[in-house]
Image (tube, helix red, strand yellow):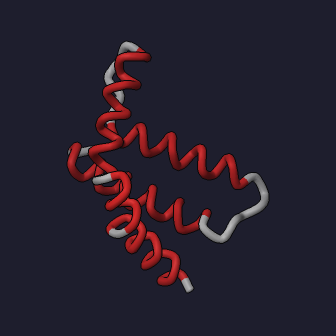
Amino acid sequence: MTGDVLSKAHEILLGDRMEQYGDPLDTAGYAACIASAILRRKVTRGEIVVSLLATKLARMGGRVAMDDPVDAAAYLDILHEARTREGA
């Protein structure tokens, strides 16, 4: 069962979303630059991904859509990759 969620998240990251939006870490990097300018402090890609995960969890608010666990797993995978690349 868990494998289904993780494999679906992996499929999304490397398939449809990658094709539609490009590398999620590149997108997080662009968002981090924008957030850094707005907040006038350095914002990391990891911080961007954590905020996206927090938003996903907040939206779930007691009800869980079929794709919510998949999206959350994908965000966690992206966060792991961001922290690995950032050395955190």
Which image quadrant for residue 74? bottom left
Where residue 5 sits: x, y (%)?
52, 76
> What residue is at 47 percent from the left and 44 percent from the top?
50
20 or 74, which is in the foreground? 20
- In the picture, the quarter occupied by the N terminus is bottom right
> What residue is at 40 percent from the left and 25 percent from the top?
35
Where residue 13 sits: x, y (%)?
37, 64
- Horizontal relation, residue 84 to residue 20: left or right: left
59 or 18, which is in the foreground? 18
32 or 50, which is in the foreground? 32
Farthest front residue?
Answer: 20
Where residue 7 sits: x, y (%)?
43, 79
40 or 14, which is in the foreground? 14
Which image quadrant for residue 63? bottom right
Q: Is residue 81 above or below residue 6?
A: above
> What residue is at 37 percent from the left and 57 percent from the top?
20
Where residue 70 sits: x, y (%)?
53, 68
Farthest bottom residue?
Answer: 1
Farthest right residue?
Answer: 62
Q: Is residue 71 above or below residue 24?
A: below
- In the picture, the quarter occupied by the C terminus is top left
- Horizontal relation, residue 84 to residue 66: left or right: left
